[in-house]
């Protein structure tokens, strides 16, 4: 219903662009590489000069680089929920940042980009960070961890279950914790299991990376985390090995599935905290662990692109690079992210980042590459991760269910850089979802409604600032959202408030 209304409204733009079947009939393989907390300005193809990201830049040089590419929220869980389901996370309660023992937030059987592609004959996998909960009503860490990805359309998963500053540090492969010894069961909770349980508070002087706020509970690998756990020692990984393992798991899975069309969601943890990269990347950026994590992420991208070359499938594979939310410097560990940032602008020219609804929160790197199909260039069309479900369905010749992917628009033409294809006319942005904070970008206008009258991390410092409930910015004149012009443009503000309400309450 919502989708059909939106599609009607966009009749002359996004939906029209797809009518020409931009994929040319063949079902492409699709890889989505989603970075974690990567800002618009954190890659050299978007202007970073303090370090370089040659592999991400290579993707951009061989494909379309979007200047108005967005994720739908400025935190992880709601962006991932929206990307997979094609439906705004704010339509569903409890889709904010998921805790360690979160149940599965996407119910079994709910249509997703994976289930839609699977129905069109794709093999589907997610490898990397999940952070959308597992199990119902909570994860059964020592038994079958379901529902989870396999119940919403993925054939295979190899996961970090939450996010790596949250416990536990184990891999989940399909329905099970990998390498779990039944004699050493895994217990996860939000209260200390015993008074003598070592934590980031009681054993702070033994930590290899100190915390700055939160993150002071169970210690693993010298780093204290959010939440408590015991057991599962044989299953635990080292933070430094995450990217190597996910790359090798991805190569194996791609090789095994190269003959059928496949969809791989490669869900990196770089550059989320704790930023503990592999030893070979330490010191490579000159910006400390946050910059080094960008170098590690770039290496992963290069490995995936090289795999496609080696298998000679780069010309049948659409690769999309994106982020799950904008940047943050100090996100809870003393990792020199502020001190060593120097002249680097993680959000590029935009204000804000993670946790807020300024452009920096959701306008993030977005690149599409499909050798031989996508022309090289820069696109100013507005596209969002929430649109992948409809757009990929269109490329795969799949039918979207009437009751699913409600807010996902087919912008496949724009994603493929087709001449004259247009992206979205407008986009609603959200933060973590609890406080009624939204952004609405429409053309060169940006309306912000801060229901909380507070904005966190708007200057890439975590403190909250007081802000008016409504603000209006003219992005043509003021890309950094510095001058609130709501008083001078009452008619624009009125129409945009109506539009925002109609989308939120649809
Ligand atoms: C916050 C954490 C932050 C990060 C974020 C989720 C504290 C003080 N801060 O609550 O470190 O984990 O949640 O990030 O605990 S996200 O990218 O997965 O959304
Ligand atoms: Ca994130």
Image: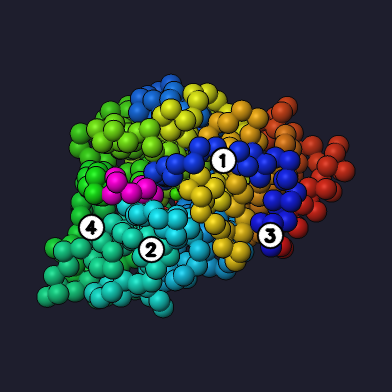
Residue 263 included in the magenta stretch of the image: yes
- In the visual, does 314 lie left or right of 444? left
Q: Mark 3 sits on what residue? A: 2
Residue 64, image x, y percentages: 50, 29
The quadrant the C terminus occupies is bottom right
Q: How many marks?
A: 4
The front one of 504 and 51 is: 504
First in sequence, mark 3 or 4: give its number. Answer: 3
Secondary structure state at the residue bearing disc 3: helix
Q: Position of residue 102 (x, y in %)?
A: 41, 69
Q: Which residue is mark 1?
A: 21
Label 1 or label 3, whichever comes before in sequence order:
3
Q: Which residues are magenta?
A: 257-266
Which residue bears the numbered disc 2?
149
Q: Work out how far the residue at label 3 is from the one at label 2, CA to CA, in angstroms.
A: 25 Å
Write down the quadrant of residue 423 in the picture. Answer: top right
Looking at the image, which residue is at 70% across and 52% down? 6
Which-is-in-front pick, marks 1 and 3? 1
> Which residue corresponds to mark 4?
220
Q: In whole angstroms, how far apart are the C-alphas of marks 4 and 2?
A: 26 Å
Task: Rate crowding at label 1 as few (under 14), some (14 to 19) or many (20 or more) other CA atoms within 10 Å.
Answer: some
Mark 2 lies within 8 Å of ligand 1 (Cβ measured): no
Sequence order check, earlier mark of 2 and 1: 1
Secondary structure found at label 4: strand
């Amino acid at each position: 219903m919502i989708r059909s209304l939106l599609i009607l409204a966009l009749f002359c733009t996004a939906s029209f662009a797809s009518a020409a079947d931009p994929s040319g009939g063949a079902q492409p393989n699709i890889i989505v590489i989603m970075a974690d907390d990567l800002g618009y300005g954190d890659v050299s193809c978007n202007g970073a000069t303090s370090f370089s990201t040659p592999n991400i830049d290579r993707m951009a040089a061989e494909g379309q680089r979007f200047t108005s590419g967005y994720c739908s929220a400025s935190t992880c869980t709601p962006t991932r929920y929206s990307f997979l389901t094609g439906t705004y996370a704010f339509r569903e309660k409890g889709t904010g940042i998921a805790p360690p023992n979160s149940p599965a937030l996407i119910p079994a059987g709910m249509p997703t980009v994976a289930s839609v592609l699977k129905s069109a004959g794709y093999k589907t996998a997610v490898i990397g960070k999940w952070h959308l909960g597992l199990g119902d009503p909570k994860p059964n860490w020592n038994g079958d961890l379901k529902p989870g990805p396999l119940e919403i359309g993925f054939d295979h998963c190899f996961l970090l279950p939450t996010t790596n500053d949250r416990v536990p540090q184990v891999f989940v492969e399909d329905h099970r914790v990998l390498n779990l010894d039944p004699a050493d069961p895994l217990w996860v909770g939000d209260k200390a299991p015993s008074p003598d349980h070592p934590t980031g508070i009681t054993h702070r002087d033994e930590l290899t990376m100190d915390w700055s706020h939160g993150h002071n509970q169970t210690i693993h690998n010298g780093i204290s985390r959010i939440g408590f756990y015991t057991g599962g020692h044989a299953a635990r990984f080292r933070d430094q090995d995450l990217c190597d393992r996910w790359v090798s798991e991805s190569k194996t899975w791609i090789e095994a599935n190269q003959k059928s069309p496949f969809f791989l969601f490669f869900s990196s943890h770089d550059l989320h905290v704790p930023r503990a990269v592999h030893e070979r990347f330490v010191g490579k950026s000159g910006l400390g662990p946050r910059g080094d994590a960008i170098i590690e992420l770039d290496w992963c991208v290069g490995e995936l692109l090289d795999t496609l070359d080696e298998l000679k499938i780069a010309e049948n594979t659409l690769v999309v690079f994106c982020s799950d939310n904008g940047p943050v410097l100090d996100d809870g560990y003393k990792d020199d992210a502020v001190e060593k940032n120097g002249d680097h602008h993680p959000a590029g020219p935009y204000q804000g980042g993670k946790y807020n609804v300024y452009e920096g929160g959701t306008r993030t790197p977005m690149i599409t590459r499909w050798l031989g199909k996508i022309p090289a260039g820069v696109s100013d069309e507005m596209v969002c991760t929430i649109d992948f479900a409809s757009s990929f369905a269109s490329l795969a010749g799949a039918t979207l269910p009437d009751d699913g992917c409600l807010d996902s628009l087919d912008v496949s033409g724009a994603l493929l850089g087709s001449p004259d294809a247009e992206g979205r006319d407008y986009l609603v942005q959200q933060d973590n979802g609890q406080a009624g904070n939204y952004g609405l970008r429409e053309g060169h206008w940006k309306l912000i409604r801060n229901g909380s009258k507070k904005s966190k991390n708007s200057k890439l410092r975590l403190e909250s600032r007081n802000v008016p409930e409504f603000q209006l910015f003219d992005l043509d004149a003021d890309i950094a959202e510095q001058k609130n012009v709501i008083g001078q443009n009452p008619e624009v503000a009125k129409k945009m408030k109506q539009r925002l309400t109609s989308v939120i309450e649809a």
